[in-house]
Image (spheres, helix red, strand yellow):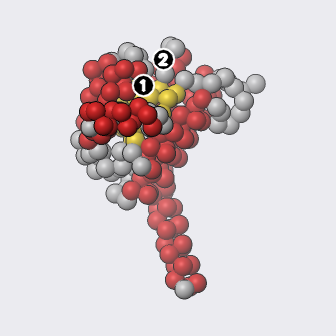
């Protein structure tokens, strides 16, 4: 049992290292992170906000990144306006009950989104119906559209202005790149809007 567990642990850590190495070796990945940080910083500097959404682990990533923006990442500074659309259970269950789960983010964006805001839509497959509807609503409302997805990206990448493609088809490994890229983006935005010292 102990030997099998150790093999499983080592195997997963090696897979994690491999996907990080693939991201490091892919200039498109670094360029996407840089460009997404620029879009987010411009929106926030203009008084707009970032909206984030995803399902399951991607919902957790949306909440995590909104928290980093509103609170802090590396040092004390002012808050940056970010809202995870995954946190209000009353809103989600009302929309899900009345209009269907595929519209749970779309309705929030239509109600809350303003031209110049940014949407960070997270879907490891790039095919989640509620994420695709959210992207459509964001386009309709004039938001800047950013996607975080995996290597294949489904329909999502073609519908976004910018897309971070994790170099993997494995959901857990894609999510690792999403949160790593998200931390880098938050750090770049923090430095741009709230220079240290």
- Is residue 154 toward the left or the right of residue 57 in the image? left
- Is residue 164 toward the left or the right of residue 5 in the image? left
User: Which of the two residues, 137 or 44, is positioned nearer the viewer here?
Assistant: 137
Residue pictured at 51% horizontal, 61% vertical? 17
Q: Is residue 38 above or below residue 9?
A: above
Query: Is residue 6 visible to the viewer in this orientation of the structure?
Result: yes
Lower position in the chain sequence, tag 2 or tag 1? 2
Residue 66 % position (x, y): 53, 34
Per the rendering, the mark at residue 161 is: none
Residue 95 % position (x, y): 33, 32
Give the SS element for disc 2: loop
Contact, mark 2 vs mark 1 (Cβ under 8 Å): yes
Residue pictured at 63% horizontal, 24% vertical? 79
Label 1: which residue?
118
Label 2: which residue?
48
Considering the image in quadrants, where does the N terminus appear?
bottom right
User: Which of the two residues, 28 or 185, is positioned nearer the viewer here?
Assistant: 185
């Amino acid at each position: 049992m102990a030997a099998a567990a150790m093999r499983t642990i080592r195997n997963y850590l090696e897979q994690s290292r491999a996907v990080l190495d693939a991201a490091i070796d892919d200039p498109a990945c670094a360029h996407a992170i840089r460009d997404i940080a620029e879009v987010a910083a411009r929106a926030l500097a203009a008084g707009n906000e970032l909206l984030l959404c995803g399902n399951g682990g991607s919902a957790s990533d949306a909440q995590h990144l909104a928290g980093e923006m509103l609170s802090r990442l590396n040092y004390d500074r002012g808050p940056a306006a970010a809202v995870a659309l995954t946190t209000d259970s009353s809103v989600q269950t009302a929309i899900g009950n009345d209009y269907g789960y595929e519209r749970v983010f779309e309705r929030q964006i239509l109600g809350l989104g303003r031209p110049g805001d940014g949407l960070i839509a997270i879907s490891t497959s790039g095919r989640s119906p509620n994420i695709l509807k959210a992207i459509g609503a964001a386009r309709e409302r004039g938001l800047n559209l950013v996607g975080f997805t995996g290597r294949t990206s489904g329909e999502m990448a073609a519908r976004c202005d910018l897309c971070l493609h994790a170099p993997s088809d494995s959901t857990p490994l894609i999510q690792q790149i999403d949160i790593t890229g998200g931390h880098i983006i938050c750090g770049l935005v923090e430095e741009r809007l709230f220079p240290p010292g």
